[in-house]
Image: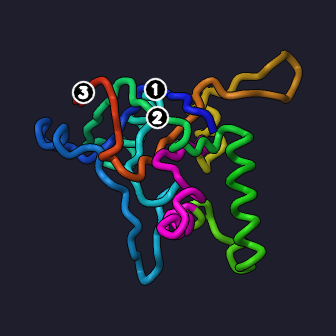
Amino acid sequence: MSNNLYVYTYQHTCNKGHQAYILKNAPFKAPVRIVKGKKKIPFLGEGYYLWEENMAAAHRWGQKHYNNIYSIVEYKDLEINDGEFLDLTDRRQLEYFKNLQDTFTSKRPESASWKLGQWIEFFKFNRQRDHALFPFNYIKADEHLPDIEENQLVRQKVFFSEGMPYFTYFSPLYMLCVIDKKQMKFDSETFVT
């Protein structure tokens, strides 16, 4: 991989709190939890979740997951080195991740049914032995909502041409999981609400 730098603005949604406390401590970790004896792994594994340049998604998350009692912190121009960035919206990086999965699935057939978060946690654990295998601190994915109508509305479904069933989305829900927030470098941090 080259030494390209990705620079975007990100939003973090959290429980409502005092501005000084939130600015000092955000972003807040989404941990792996045990619920009713089962491991519950967040979307892209344990980490700090941000929305990529999507204030509407940050507000929607707060309304839905924090009962409309939330705060948002914005990180202006967060710098991400591509050597630390696993972008699951990029075909080449997705292929790398799938090949990595295939390597381990051949050794552990039971892993074929693992969900994405399980794989990421597995690779994070195994990088203690081989950091080069999974050197990522930032993981990006495009969230799709389970309700089809809500997904089309929120992601702004747009048809390519009249009378054709093919479409795209004008408002993808790019989420970023930061594994180690101490590595975050950004121009400014702003308390939005």
124 above or below 55? below
Task: Label 3: state its secondary structure.
Answer: strand
State the residue lying farthest toward the top.
162
Q: Amino acid at mark 3?
A: Thr
Which of the numbered marks, if any, corresponds to residue 8?
A: 1
Q: CA distance from mark 1 to mark 3?
A: 14 Å
Q: Amino acid at mark 2?
A: Ile
Task: Label 1: state its secondary structure.
Answer: strand
Residue 131 in percent (x, y) is at 52, 60
Residue placed at 68% from the left, 44% from the top?
Answer: 93
Residue 78 in percent (x, y) is at 39, 30
Q: Describe residue 47's horizontal placement relative to residue 157 as left or right.
A: left
User: Which numbered disc flags the more N-terminal residue, 3 or 2?
Assistant: 2
Mark 2 closeness class: few <14, some 14–19, many ≥20 residues within 10 Å: many
Residue 5 in percent (x, y) is at 51, 28
Q: CA distance from mark 1 to mark 2?
A: 9 Å
Residue placed at 29% from the left, 44% from the top?
Answer: 27
Q: Nearer the viewer, residue 2 or 158?
A: 2
Comparing marks 1 and 2, which lies closer to the viewer?
2
User: Which quadrant of the rendered structure holds the N terminus?
Assistant: top right
Q: Nearer the viewer, residue 172 or 49?
A: 49
190 above or below 181? above
- Residue under label 3, please give it: 190
Is label 1 in contact with label 2 (beta carbons under 8 Å)? yes
Magenta part of the chain: 120-144
Task: Label 2: state its secondary structure.
Answer: strand
Residue 125 in percent (x, y) is at 49, 69
Quarter of the image where one finds residue 160: top right
- Residue under label 2, please give it: 80
Q: Nearer the viewer, residue 19 or 164?
A: 19
